[in-house]
Image (cartoon, coloured by chain):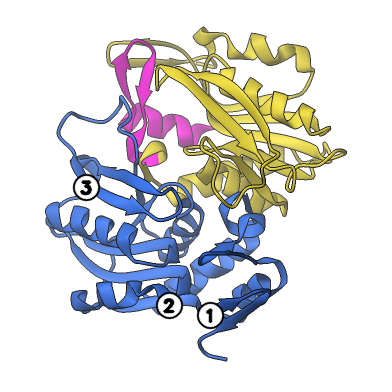
Chain colours: A yellow, B blue
């Protein structure tokens, strides 16, 4: 998606160690027009697979997941990383390593909002190692739901997440696929 | 705002101790159409005060803040509760008590995205004691920005947040104002 790729080239910053800083339009400050355009694009790409619910993980997945859900006319659930007091005692919980946090985090979903028979589209900001998304997959499968698609804003193809998720046999769409970052140069896969 | 009040009456749940559960449409599962309608309503109410940036706190403020920013044509910044590795060493940081978490949490904003001269509209899900919003106010003021308005989806008028924020002298708009919750009965202030 050219709009996102241009923005990454203009404002993204390679911090080294595989970390791409996009805090100016996705991860801290959010450009709502860009998120809306990305949501519209996801809705177009996942139009014909019978999605019933959009699933993401707090925190940075929320903005693109909400705009995607808006364009698809569906509810969105965000997995929590800390169990709020409003959640029932029995929950779906999985542990997943967080690359950017350097520790294990919990992902928690209430059974109230993810049920057997749902057809789930996972939306997140990054596809890197795929660990967070695989955590969401485990939660959805435990709930008896079926994963039907995965969409991410930015994929770092050199971190192998796509290979980890390939056995699911569902479409995986990333709006900007980065195959290398060297100094100030960010190289997209389709270039 | 009738749409939100009806939804609270239909799906909100008084858990006692002043806790209103709205996990089915705001805090865990999100209804994107409702959030979009709320964003549109905030944009209408804060149309004429020269806002340059929308500010919220992760996590539950993100959805309504993004839709508000979309309707106002402005960027949105969400204060982080944990400093990500992409953030510079020098940040704006304040401590605030979290009623629902029962502990002190940090609110952090990077100086890169909140500058002197900005005119800030704070959007959040709840106005209860006002502590979180006051934390955002402190951060914005430290950055040299000016708070020009505060909008929340749901206000619990019996927790006093409006009085705490009144000295700011800015418009405070809540789309549903709850003055009492007794058992299954939720009473709105305008009833």
| Start-end of magenta stretch | A1-25
User: x%, y% of residue B188?
Assistant: 55, 83
Farthest right residue in view: A117
The residue under the point 23% across, 40% down is B110
Q: Nearer the viewer, residue B170 or B112?
A: B170
Quadrant where the N terminus of chain A is found in the figure: top right
The residue under the point 17% across, 51% down is B115
Residues at marks 1 and 2, common chain? yes
Question: Is A24 part of what is drawn in magenta?
Answer: yes
Disc number for residue B158: 2
Which quadrant of the figure has residue B167? Answer: bottom left
Farthest bottom residue in view: B191
Residues at marks 2 and 3, common chain? yes
Report in which chain the residue with disc 3 lies: B
Q: Nearer the viewer, residue A125 or B78?
A: B78
The residue under the point 36% across, 46% down is B103
- Residue B57 as seen in the image, left or right of residue A150: left
Indicate which disc, 2 or 3, sits on the residue closer to the N terminus.
3
User: x%, y% of residue B57?
Assistant: 37, 51
Report in which chain the residue with disc 2 lies: B
Indicate which disc, 1 or 3, sits on the residue closer to the N terminus.
3
**Residue, disc 3:** B94
Mark 1 to mark 2 CA distance (whole Å): 7 Å
Whether the residues at callouts 1 and 2 have beta carbons within 8 Å, the answer is yes
SS at badge 2: helix
User: x%, y% of residue A30?
Assistant: 40, 45
């Amino acid at each position: 998606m050219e709009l996102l790729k241009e923005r990454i080239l203009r404002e993204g910053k390679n911090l080294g160690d595989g970390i791409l800083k996009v805090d100016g339009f996705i991860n801290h400050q959010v450009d709502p027009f860009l998120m809306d355009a990305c949501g519209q694009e996801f809705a177009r790409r996942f139009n014909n697979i019978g999605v019933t619910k959009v699933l993401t993980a707090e925190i940075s997945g929320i903005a693109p997941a909400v705009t995607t859900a808006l364009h698809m006319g569906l509810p969105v659930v965000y997995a929590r990383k800390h169990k709020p007091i409003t959640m029932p005692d029995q929950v779906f919980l999985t542990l997943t390593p967080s690359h950017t946090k350097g520790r294990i985090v919990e992902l928690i979903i209430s059974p109230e909002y993810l049920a057997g028979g749902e057809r789930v589209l996972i939306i997140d900001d990054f596809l890197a190692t795929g660990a967070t998304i695989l955590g969401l997959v485990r939660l959805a499968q435990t709930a008896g739901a079926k994963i039907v698609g995965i969409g991410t804003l930015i994929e770092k193809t050199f971190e192998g997440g796509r290979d980890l998720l390939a056995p699911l046999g569902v479409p995986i769409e990333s709006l900007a696929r980065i195959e290398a970052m060297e100094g100030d140069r960010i190289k997209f896969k389709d270039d």
